[in-house]
Amino acid sequence: MGMTMAEKILARHSGRERVEPGELIEAEVDLMMGNDITAPIAIKRLKALGMTRLPFPDKVFLVMSHYAPAKDIQSAEQIKISREFAREQALQHYYAEGSGIEHVILPEEGWVLPGDLVIGADSHSCTYGATNCFATGVGSTDLAAAMATGRLWFKVPETARYEFTGVRPSYITGKDLILHTIGQIGVDGSLYQVMEFAGDTLDSLPMDDRLTMANMAIEAGAKAGIFPCDAIAEEYVAGRARRPYTPTASDPDAQYARHYKWDVTAMEPLVALPWAPENIKTVGEIAGTAMDRVFIGSCTNARLSDLRVVAAIMRGNKVAVDTLVIPGSRQVYRDAMREGLLEIFMDAGATVSAPTCGACLGGFMGVLGPKEKCLSTTNRNFVGRMGHPTSESYLANPAVAAATAITGAITHPKDVAARELASV
């Protein structure tokens, strides 16, 4: 009996020929990440253990992303703890305030690669599975254990296969594919499983869309999301990989807990209504629903391709509601600036911020007030996620967000003329 790609990665990193779902294993970790919220807790655990020197500092990444630049004294203290630890340990991979979001930076810079085993003290660390690695979120104590030993225990998860067929219609993105999936199976539909994405639709699905889909695997309760290392993935990682990597494929006779298959040919842009990513409607069903704000950013949809889509719709138009655009990394910010995208956003009346998580987690930069409604490109719309507990967050792809910003109500992108960006 064969193995899935996730099982192969876990077997290889635990020094075994094969593993089975349900087994407990101890495996070597290739990369471990903490941010300004989670890293300080892990650092305190390490100091309580009396550890003065990390055995594998080159594997440790600290990214100041959630409340950075520091919004208050407490967040400044969190960043200070992380910064001082990075200096003490001479960490090569410390990303200071303004660098951006970890889940944008690490794939962008070629640190998370096919065949890797990656952990991050952030639930959306499953993002990296788009590059054909096994990546999962852990708690700060688990991060501390991995930092101290280079290893961590795992319960081998089952794998469910999600197959998409057909050609994507206009304005259908990876965000719509994953929202459709969560709408079909629910927020606990893949609980402690690996979501393995497959199908001929992937043959033309860009890496940025794959990163979005893997990012939201956690919203279906999954342990990880993973994509094959096909031609698109290989092209993406080959030009940026910082070290050797091992493309990993599932065996033809691999066993799956479930197998889903959907034809995307007639799919329409989707919106997740409050207060769960599974509460799905098509844009057409709720078109005209008034919004108070639009937020375009987060680790889900703040890459350059996302901003290009937004700029094509905003160019020559004016926003009708408060609109915040936050690039996902310093590189995205720089590229968007060079292409003139930031000027388009500002000319449209939107606010552009330095790279950060921002309003996504209701931390700062666009927090929602009482009963405010926001159309957002983020990944979660739980009660109080983006601010006041009576506020409402709606999730959609960047094109829908841009169209909604222009009209002030949920709008299909086809109803707002998009301008070519070739001359920008």
Image (cartoon, grey):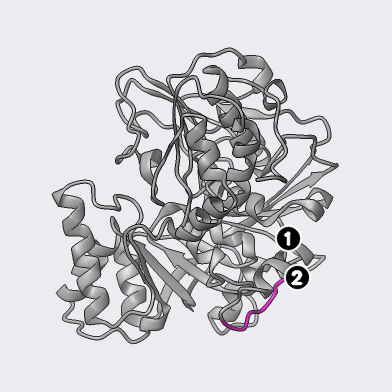
Residue at x-position 82% and y-position 30%? 266
Q: Are marks 2 and 1 in contact (CB under 8 Å)?
A: yes
Relative to residue 389, is residue 324 depicted above or below?
A: below
Amino acid under disc 1:
Gln
Amino acid at the residue labelled 2: Gly
As helix, strand or loop, the secondary structure at mark 1 comes to loop
Which of 289/272 is in front? Answer: 289
Q: Which residue is mark 2?
A: 2
Left or right placement of residue 151 versus residue 41 in this view: right
Q: Which residues are magenta?
A: 243-249
**What x and y, as percent, mark residue 199?**
80, 51
Query: Where's the C terminus, which quadrant?
Result: top right
Picture quadrant where residue 414 is located: top right
| Residue 54 in sight here | yes
User: Mark 1 — residue?
Assistant: 255
Q: Position of residue 241 (x, y in %)?
A: 60, 76
Circle 2 residues within 10 Å: few <14, some 14–19, many ≥20: few
Label ID, residue 49: none
| Earlier-in-chain disc, 2 versus 1 | 2
Within-10-Å neighbours for mark 1: few <14, some 14–19, many 20+: some
Q: Quadrant of residue 351?
A: top left
Q: What secondary structure is marked by label 2?
A: loop
